[in-house]
Amino acid sequence: MALQDIEKVLKAHLENDTKRLDRIEAKIDKLSETVVALARVEEKVNALEKESERTNERLDKIDERLEAVESKAGNNDVTVKVVNKVFWLLLTTAVGALAAYILH
């Protein structure tokens, strides 16, 4: 084999290796971009988890307050029923007394 033939073979091999390395570099660049994107997604997921925890804590507090309001509303319902019965009792007594006064 002549020296020129060897140079041609080496150049061809070198070009193939260069192309192969370029493809490998392109793939590494894509992988780097993917890793960066994954890191961003992970940060967003962590932030969403923290916000979800805060929201759950707020909902728990609201639930406790709602239970307290429901309890007070139940107590107020009993009070209103008693006042309503007393009112009608007093009204009936007053009407009865007025009717007795008028008839006698």
Image (cartoon, grey):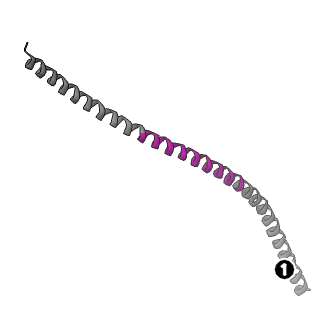
Q: Nearer the viewer, residue 3 or 13?
A: 3
What secondary structure do most residues of the magenta stretch adopt?
Answer: helix
Q: Quadrant of residue 101?
A: bottom right
Numbered label tally: 1
Q: Residue 59: where, in percent of width, then height?
A: 64, 51
Q: Nearer the viewer, residue 17 or 11?
A: 11
Q: Nearer the viewer, residue 12 or 76?
A: 12
Label 1 crowd (10 A; few <14 / some 14-19 / many >=20): few
Residue depicted at x 73% and y 58%? 69
Q: Nearer the viewer, residue 73 or 36?
A: 36
Location of the C terminus (image quadrant)? bottom right
Q: Is residue 26 above or below residue 72?
A: above
Horizontal placement of 68 versus 58: left or right?
A: right
Give the amino acid at mark 1: Val
The verdict on residue 50 being magenta is: yes
Q: Secondary structure at mark 1?
A: helix
Magenta region, residue range: 36-65
The verdict on residue 53 being magenta is: yes
Residue at label 1?
95
Horizontal placement of 34 versus 87: left or right?
A: left
Residue depicted at x 49% and y 40%? 42
Location of the N terminus (image quadrant)? top left
Q: Which residue occupies the extreme front position in the image? A: 3
Horizontal placement of 55 versus 79: left or right?
A: left
Residue depicted at x 18% and y 27%? 15
Q: Residue 17: where, in percent of width, then height?
A: 22, 25
Q: Which residue occupies the extreme top position in the image? A: 1
Residue depicted at x 33% and y 37%? 30
Q: Is residue 94 above or below residue 56?
A: below
Q: Is residue 99 above or below residue 52?
A: below
Q: Residue 33: where, in percent of width, then height?
A: 37, 40
